[in-house]
Image: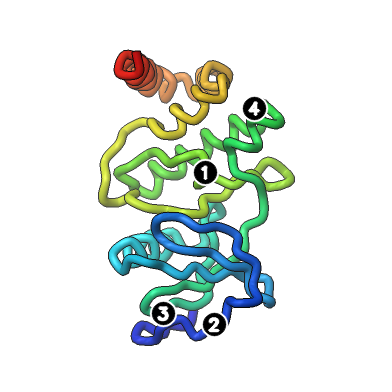
Amino acid sequence: MKKNKNKKNPYDVSDCRLLGKGNNGEVYELPNGKVIKICFKTKDFKGEYKILQRVKGNKYFPRIYEVGSNYMVRECVHGEGLYDYINKNGINKLLGHNLIEMLKEFKKLKFKKIDLRCRDILVQYDESIKVIDPKGFYSKSRSFPQHLSKGLYSLGKLDSFLEILNEEEPKLYKQWAPQIDNYIKDRNKTKA
């Protein structure tokens, strides 16, 4: 990987396709098929970079090719956001299995936060998944998939996911199901 720590983004993205824009930055597809993420906040950028460095080579995360003071060039991940994908296609055993395996991998990687938002997961054509915006995995603590559960609940698919979890990983189900249930109940009370 090429490091240009003191160098601002040397890439002209004016003719590149914008893939996404969020609070932390903008992502463009480069002509070479890679993507560049230009970050607005140095703190957020450094946190994401550190996570991607620590999980280097892991199948759930994009590979980094180059990094500068406010940008990183990395592998382009194709696919559809988990929320949109499930909204169109529902959740089947394969996708549920892949989500569970990803969460188990988070534990193996010693993440403090076993969670992420649906919009930070891309579902690829074969229903494998990739994380595109990793943050807070080593700095925040969460022992169950809270944000993921919230997204699945809003799609009406949380029960389907929990059934798959109970079939495949009964111990995790016993650990997470009460926490998820309490979280959803508390959310619904505050909305009422």
- The answer to the question of whether label 4 and label 2 lie on touching residues, with beta carbons closer than 8 A, is no
Residue 143 in picture, x, y percent from top left = 31, 33
Amino acid bearing label 2 = Tyr
The residue where tag 4 is placed is 91
Residue at the (38%, 61%) spot, across then down = 48
Instruction: Tell me which label, 3 or 1, sits earlier in the chain.
Output: 3
Q: Residues within 10 Å of mark 2 (few under 14, many from 20)?
A: few
Amino acid bearing label 3 = Gly
The residue where tag 1 is placed is 119
Provide the secondary structure element on which disc 2 rests: loop
How does the figure colour the protein chain or chains? Answer: rainbow
Instruction: Tell me which label, 2 or 3, sits earlier in the chain.
Output: 2
Instruction: Tell me which label, 3 or 4, sits earlier in the chain.
Output: 3
Q: Nearer the viewer, residue 182 or 55?
A: 182
Residue 64 in picture, x, y percent from top left = 51, 70
- The answer to the question of whether label 2 and label 1 lie on touching residues, with beta carbons closer than 8 A, is no
Q: Quadrant of residue 49?
A: bottom left
- The answer to the question of whether label 2 and label 3 lie on touching residues, with beta carbons closer than 8 A, is no
Does 105 sit above or below residue 162? below
- The answer to the question of whether label 1 and label 4 lie on touching residues, with beta carbons closer than 8 A, is no
Q: CA distance from mark 3 to mark 4?
A: 38 Å
The residue where tag 3 is placed is 68
Amino acid bearing label 4 = Ile
160 sits to left or right of 134: right
Q: CA distance from mark 4 to mark 2?
A: 39 Å
